[in-house]
Image (cartoon, rainbow, N blue to C red):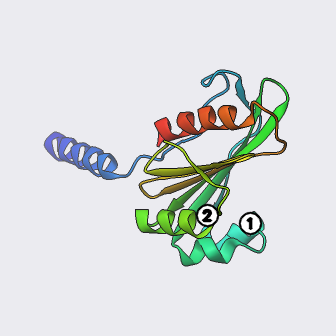
Amino acid sequence: MLAAAAVAILAAAAIAGCKKAQVNPFPASGAISGWEKTSETRTFDAKNLYQYIDGDAEQYISAGVVSTSTSDYKFQGSLEAVVDVHTMGDAAGARKILETGLSSSAKTVQIGDAAVSYGQSVIFRKGPYLVRIVAYESTPATPEALQALAHGVEAKL
């Protein structure tokens, strides 16, 4: 009986070890100089993504989005930004979304597998993840601050 219980415990541990760990890509307050996490993380699966991305959810669904998580941040107490992490079914879906939205004003930056920066946003992909960070205003410090936050998110993916 004791041997059977030990086998059952080992089997349960092995099965639990096979489960994919849940990724938390959102840096805690203070983990990146000047940035504070100001909201709880919200998560939307593909079927209810429209509740968050009204009017544009279909683009993500057709590219294979599995879920989208979002959280708000504030830089040095004033610059507010939102971080959206889209978990796609595969890297091709993340690539498709990133490449679809490119405009001539995009500046290539070194984050993840590919990234672009605009005045008030940074968008990058890493494996099956597409990350969009958008500030609510533009200041001279905005691009550098957003890239620092993006590197912090990338390190957690």
Q: Position of residue 87 (x, y in %)?
A: 52, 58
According to the picture, the residue beneath numbered tag 2 turns out to be 102
Mark sitting earlier along the chain (1/2): 1
- Residue 84 versus residue 55 in the image, above or below: above
**Left-right relation of 54 to 110:** right
Q: What is the three-letter code of the residue carrying label 2?
A: Leu
Q: Position of residue 119 (x, y in %)?
A: 73, 46
- Residue 99 versus residue 39 in the image, above or below: below
Give SS at disc 2: loop
Q: Nearer the viewer, mark 1 or mark 2?
A: 2
Foreground residue, 106 or 51? Answer: 106
**Left-right relation of 131 to 95:** right
According to the picture, the residue beneath numbered tag 1 turns out to be 53
Q: Quadrant of residue 56?
A: bottom right
- Residue 111 versus residue 76 in the image, above or below: below
Q: Quadrant of residue 152?
A: top right
